[in-house]
Image (spheres, grey):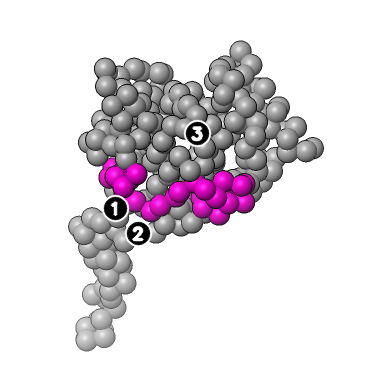
Amino acid sequence: MEPAVLRDDMVDSLEHEAKGVVRSDRLSVAMRAVPRHEFVTDERAAYADTAHERLGTRVLAPSTAARLLEALQPEPDDSVLVVGAGVGYTAAVLAEIAGEANVHAIDITRCVVLDARENLADAGYEGVLVDCRDGADGLPEYAPFDRILLEAAAVQPPDALLDQLADDGRLVMPMGTKQQTLTAVENDGSTSLGSVAFSPLLVEGEQSGSIERNRTAREDREIARREAQSRRGWEQDWINWDG
């Protein structure tokens, strides 16, 4: 089946009252335009409403991505920052709405950044800037942002992201630890938009493939490994068990 047909079927299902996560015409048009199969290697899985893992990061199900984007309420020409680039799909949909040059994405994991760049280029959105940064630090060089989307959970919005938000801007994030709420933050307060479940926002050293930040944990593992490999008393050559 043609990818365009699969995209239409996917968005139709997200608009149906059974899910009802795509409500605006703007998001509907954008999601129908973005070739999601360029971001998910299995074409059949690309248009299924399921999440999966890639390069140690979570690829959001289309319905979850739609919830985030509807909460964000992006408009044409908005300057947008996506914290947690992932495979780049969310940034591509935002590029359809706000324009490629206005969308910036960051991720703390270098291999994820490279993957997102390649996916975006293959899909025709090479104008989206993707950089390797600590998400909590944001991207101050391009601030202020009209919209900031944080695709990872935190107890509260990082101060740097709030500082980089425009005066009339909107920040959307999963707020909380075990119990998380999708929250929209604006100057006049915050709005809760239902329960979600996201991985926590990573800091330097916690990304996939990084060196362990916790020295005690590293040392404990090394000590355990050495003890496991050491010779026990009954294995020592100098003990004469028969004497």
Q: Position of residue 93 (x, y in %)?
A: 55, 35
- Bounds of the magenta segment: 116-142
Q: Position of residue 124 (x, y in %)?
A: 61, 47
Going from the N terminus, do you reach mark 2 or mark 1 first? 1
Q: CA distance from mark 3 to mark 2?
A: 34 Å
In this view, the mark in front (2 or 1): 1
Relative depth, front residue between 242 and 218: 218
- Circles 3 and 2: CB distance less than 8 Å? no
Three-letter code for the amino acid on which mark 2 is drawn? Ser
Q: Residue at x 71, y 27 (%)?
A: 9
**Where 134 falls versus 166 (above or below)?**
below
- SS state under label 1: loop
Task: Judge left or right: residue 134 versus residue 121.
Answer: left
Image disc number at residue 204? 1
Residue at numbered disc 3: 98
> From this viewpoint, is residue 87 visible?
no
Three-letter code for the amino acid on which mark 3 is drawn? Ala
Residue at numbered disc 2: 210
Location of residue 225 by image quarter: bottom left
Image disc number at residue 147? none
